[in-house]
Amino acid sequence: MKFLDQAKVFIRSGDGGAGAVSFRREKYIEFGGPDGGDGGRGGDVWAECVDGLNTLIDYRYAQHFKAPTGVHGMGRNMTGKKSEDKILQVPVGTQIFEDDNETLICDLTEVGQRFLLARGGNGGFGNAHFKSSTNQAPRRANPGQEGVEKWIWLRLKLIADAGLVGLPNAGKSTFLASVTAAKPKIADYPFTTLHPNLGVVRIDQKEFVLADIPGLIEGAHEGVGIGDRFLGHVERTRVLLHLVSAQEEDVAQAYKIVRRELDAYGNGLELDQKAEVIALSQTDTLPDDELAEKAKDLEEASGQKPIMLSSATRSGVDDVLRALMRHIQAQRKEEDGPEDPTRWEV
């Protein structure tokens, strides 16, 4: 399935049904009278967060969503039926914006959440509604109220506990493939990963969701390379795993490039302030003396001792996962209070 994290769609709620003009004409009833029923209300347009989706690809091919018009009123005081609602099913983590792509309408972060995007028009009154002591036979009825129409933006921000960041070819996809059941594309050229990938990590009978974000390069916040478009997917993460390849000639500079891009991303979210675990990856490709020197340089640049990691040999993999799990558990306790000891059992 292709990945799509942004889509623009047109929505329109249903018009209300028209009221009816009708009169009773029955044998043996001396005085008839108006009996036109009211029209039914038009359908609403809702957004609903559902399980099992992780992309907005459905909205690439279908971009117009209109709720039906309410049923018109009928004689014998029969009110028209309200029409069915139109429901836009979206993945967990979807944000919905107005046409300007800046004004936030809603943020759907839990399965089952619903939000009313456009209310259907009210049905019109039938002529029975206008009967009075001075107007015994009204011959007027109201048309239904028009529905609401507008363009909206759907923007998906994946919900993951930890996010992988680093320069292209830092070993992010290889790491994700080695610790989860995800199968990202892996190759020996830059920008192999063109869209985020998710995987579930299990360590010490606990689990968390890990997101692999396409590689950043210098100037990504200005649109260089893939740009920083996918950084939105790490906004919701609790901790970042920053991988720096041991094959980089200057590991300190490689680290600083990504940190500058995180800082420049902005968006009021301060990604550079997130908890961070640093790992020197692809350590199986260099001798020990070179690794020690590069680890020292990286520690001086980052202010913390990097974990030596090789996804190919699984050296240091468990150490990295446990370090991520410690940060995640600490933040879960802050958000949810004391943790239920059975909550994360597999």
Image (cartoon, rainbow, N blue to C red):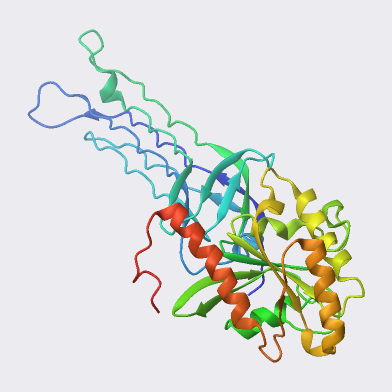
Image vertical order of residue 126 relative to residue 13, above or below: above
- Which residue appears farthest toward the left when viewing the image? 28
Nearest the eye: 275 or 2? 275
> Is residue 325 shown left or right of residue 187?
left
Q: How many numbered discs?
A: 0
Location of residue 94 by image quarter: bottom right
Q: Front-most of 85 and 152?
A: 152
Q: Is residue 2 above or below residue 262?
A: below
Outermost residue to the top: 134
Percent x, y of residue 161: 56, 64
The residue at the point 37 percent across, 58 percent down is 338
Check the picture and name the quadrant holding the N terminus.
bottom right
The answer to whether residue 229 is left or right of residue 297 is left
Pick the residue in front: 118 or 168.
168
| Residue 182 shows in the view | no
Query: Residue 276 falls in which quadrant of the image?
Result: bottom right
Image quadrant in which the C terminus is located: bottom left
Q: Position of residue 70 (x, y in %)?
A: 40, 42
Percent across and percent down for residue 118 are 49, 40
* Side of 291 where 202 appears, left or right: left
Q: Residue at x 35, y 35 (%)?
A: 39
- Of residue 146 and residue 238, the one placed in the foreground of this image is 238
Q: Residue 199, position in %: x, y?
A: 58, 75
Question: Is residue 302 at least partly visible in the picture?
Answer: yes
Residue in the image at 30% along x and 24% along y: 127
Looking at the image, which residue is at 85% across and 60% down? Answer: 257
Q: Residue furthest bottom?
A: 313
